[in-house]
Image (cartoon, helix red, strand yellow):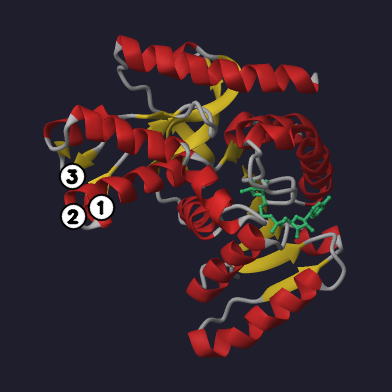
């Protein structure tokens, strides 16, 4: 039997992710949304593409949580995206309500699933989902670091005129304006970019990465990025379904690691069928530590606003 992934929210991110999963054939998909007809229509369209893709995945579009039952992975993309001028944090209250509702409904019918939260402000929404689901924290995580690192990789690749595939990057901290791109841990085939790019240019690439999401919002005007967010989530889904033990930056619940307690933030983890199977602690220098702490404090102050 195929594995099952429920994608909650059939908007831009959810539908793009559903396409990647179905096209690659790695799992069956339940695509859920409250909008009438939209998940059904997109699922039917994707089903009709399967013969062309040579995929035997099945996809159902639905307004009924019963169809999400017994999922291996639940991905939460439901909620509202940013408009120009908005930060991810401006979505706090509206999206907390949505994430709380969809977590409650989905976790009840898929008690053994791993939950990946994409809805912004993501680190805080992961905490909402943890609380409402009552799952162990290693089974609830957020998607942010892989996307932010992919943006950093792209900008570094353009700067050096090399393939983005040969660039590895690391971005830690909350998935917000205070995220912490880590040049020291960003390499081209093993060579740190601190040896390849001037400090001034690295600073510019770091700044562009921090505002990578806003740059796209400003261009699109009616919503936020979705191809790269979906691709980043796909990488997490695949690592979990196939127990790949990938080392990826994800929002994980910290219990003393990096000196933080009881809070979600982006750190390198090992992702496998158990979810976050390990949190990898790096030796940060004083500046990196200070930047990381600032980013964690920003997440904390949002969590406090919600009185979780
Ligand atoms: N239950 C289920 N679906 C819901 C609910 C709910 N209570 N409320 C809203 N939705 C659905 C909407 O109907 C819509 O189809 O969530 C979907 C969101 O899709 P888009 O508006 O296209 O937003 P998208 O770009 O996919 O972003 C979704 O991911 O990256 C983050 O910041 C982004 O928080 C946003 C989320």
Separation (CA) of disc 1 from disc 2: 5 Å
Report the residue at 33% width, 22% height from top.
282
Residue 92 position, x and y percent, is: 74, 33
Q: Is residue 167 above or below residue 176?
A: below
Looking at the rendered structure, the secondary structure element under dot 2 is loop
Residue 61 position, x and y percent, is: 76, 71
Q: Is residue 121 above or below residue 304?
A: below
Question: In the rendered image, which quarter is residue 134 located in?
Answer: top right
Q: Residue at label 3?
A: 188
- From the image, which quarter does the N terminus lie in? bottom right
Taking the image as drawn, is residue 135 in sight? Answer: no
Report the residue at 54% width, 19% height from top.
296
Assess disc 2: are there few (<14), some (14-19) or many (≥20) residues with their C-alpha within 10 Å of its C-alpha: few
Q: Earlier in the sequence, mark 2 or mark 3?
A: 2
Horizontal side of 146 relative to 62 (left or right) equals: left
Looking at the rendered structure, the secondary structure element under dot 1 is helix
Horizontal side of 205 relative to 254 (left or right) equals: left
Assess disc 1: are there few (<14), some (14-19) or many (≥20) residues with their C-alpha within 10 Å of its C-alpha: few
Horizontal side of 101 relative to 58 (left or right) equals: right
Q: Residue at label 2?
A: 161
> Is the CB atom of the residue marked by disc 2 within 8 angstroms of ligand 1's nearest atom?
no
Q: Are marks 1 and 2 in contact (CB under 8 Å)?
A: yes
Separation (CA) of disc 2 from disc 3: 11 Å
Q: Residue at label 1?
A: 158
Taking the image as drawn, is residue 219 in sight? Answer: yes
Residue 86 position, x and y percent, is: 66, 39
């Amino acid at each position: 039997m195929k594995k099952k992934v429920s994608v909650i929210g059939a908007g831009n991110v959810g539908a793009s992710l559903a396409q990647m999963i179905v096209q690659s054939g790695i799992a069956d998909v339940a695509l859920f949304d409250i909008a009438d007809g939209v998940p059904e229509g997109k699922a039917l369209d994707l089903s009709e593409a399967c013969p062309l893709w040579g995929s035997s995945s099945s996809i159902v579009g639905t307004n009924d949580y019963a169809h999400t039952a017994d999922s291996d992975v639940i991905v939460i993309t439901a909620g509202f995206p940013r408009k120009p001028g908005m930060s991810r944090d401006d979505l706090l209250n509206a999206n907390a309500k949505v994430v709380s509702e969809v977590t409650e409904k989905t976790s009840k019918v898929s008690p053994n699933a791993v939950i990946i939260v994409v809805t912004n402000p993501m680190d805080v929404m992961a905490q909402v989902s943890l609380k409402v689901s009552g799952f162990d924290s290693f089974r609830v995580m957020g998607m942010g670091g892989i996307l932010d690192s992919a943006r950093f990789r792209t900008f570094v690749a353009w700067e050096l005129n090399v393939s983005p595939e040969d660039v590895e990057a690391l971005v830690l901290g909350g998935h917000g304006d205070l995220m912490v791109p880590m040049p020291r841990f960003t390499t081209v085939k093993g060579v740190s970019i601190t040896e390849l790019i001037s400090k001034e240019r690295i600073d510019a690439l770091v700044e562009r990465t921090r505002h990578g999401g806003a740059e796209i919002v400003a261009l699109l005007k009616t919503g936020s990025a979705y191809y790269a967010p979906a691709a980043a989530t796909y990488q997490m889904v695949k690592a979990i379904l196939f127990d790949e033990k990938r080392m990826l930056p994800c929002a994980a619940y910290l219990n003393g690691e990096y000196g933080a307690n009881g809070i979600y933030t982006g750190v390198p983890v090992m992702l496998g069928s158990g979810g976050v199977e390990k949190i990898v602690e790096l030796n940060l220098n004083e500046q990196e530590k200070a930047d990381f702490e600032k980013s964690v404090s920003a997440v904390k102050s949002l969590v406090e606003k919600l009185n979780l």
